[in-house]
Amino acid sequence: MKITKKQFAIFAVALVLICAFTATTVFAAGDVASAIEGTWNAAKSQIKTVVNNVVFPVVDMVLAILFFVKLGTSYFDYKKHGQFEMTAPAILFACLIFTMTAPMYIWGIVGM
């Protein structure tokens, strides 16, 4: 494997650029923590509104659809095999109840 002058030059330039750009230290001007905290306090109510009005209803709808589909397939399996499998519908129902009641207590846990 022979290294040509062009490959060596490209390697040397890349090495110099890497060394030049990684040796720079950047310091923030001012109090960064208070800026982040101020931004969070300004956006906190908007985040809570979006999660309560969009995210939780979408998750509830998906879980409800999955629950009823799984309940239907479990019924058809019962008709076919004579044994009703309750595990999957029970888990989906528990998750559905959890997500339907989550907006009442989740913000207290998160601290909003």
Image: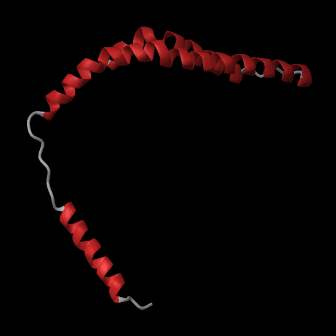
**Residue drawn at the location 21% of the way across and 68% of the way down:** 19
> Residue 64: where, in percent of width, then height?
65, 15
Task: Tell me the quarter of the picture where residue 68 sits.
Answer: top right
> Residue 48: where, in percent of width, then height?
37, 15
Q: Is residue 112 visible?
A: no
**Residue drawn at the location 34% of the way across and 16% of the way down:** 46
Seen from the viewer's position, the closer of residues 57 and 101 is 57
Q: Is residue 100 above or below residue 13?
A: above
Q: Is residue 107 visible?
A: yes
Q: Is residue 56 left or right of residue 31?
A: right
**Residue drawn at the location 41% of the way across and 91% of the way down:** 2
Q: Is residue 57 left or right of residue 6?
A: right
Seen from the viewer's position, the closer of residues 52 and 15 is 15
Q: Is residue 77 left or right of residue 69?
A: right
Q: Is residue 59 left or right of residue 104?
A: right
Q: Colour mode? A: secondary structure
> Residue 60: where, in percent of width, then height?
57, 16
| Residue with the most extreme left position | 30
| Residue with the most extreme bottom position | 2
**Residue drawn at the location 31% of the way across and 77% of the way down:** 11
Task: Tell me the quarter of the picture where residue 50 sits.
Answer: top left
Quadrant containing the C terminus in the rendered view = top left
Quadrant containing the N terminus in the rendered view = bottom left
Q: How many marks?
A: 0
> Residue 21: where, in percent of width, then height?
21, 62
Q: Is residue 99 above or below residue 30?
A: above
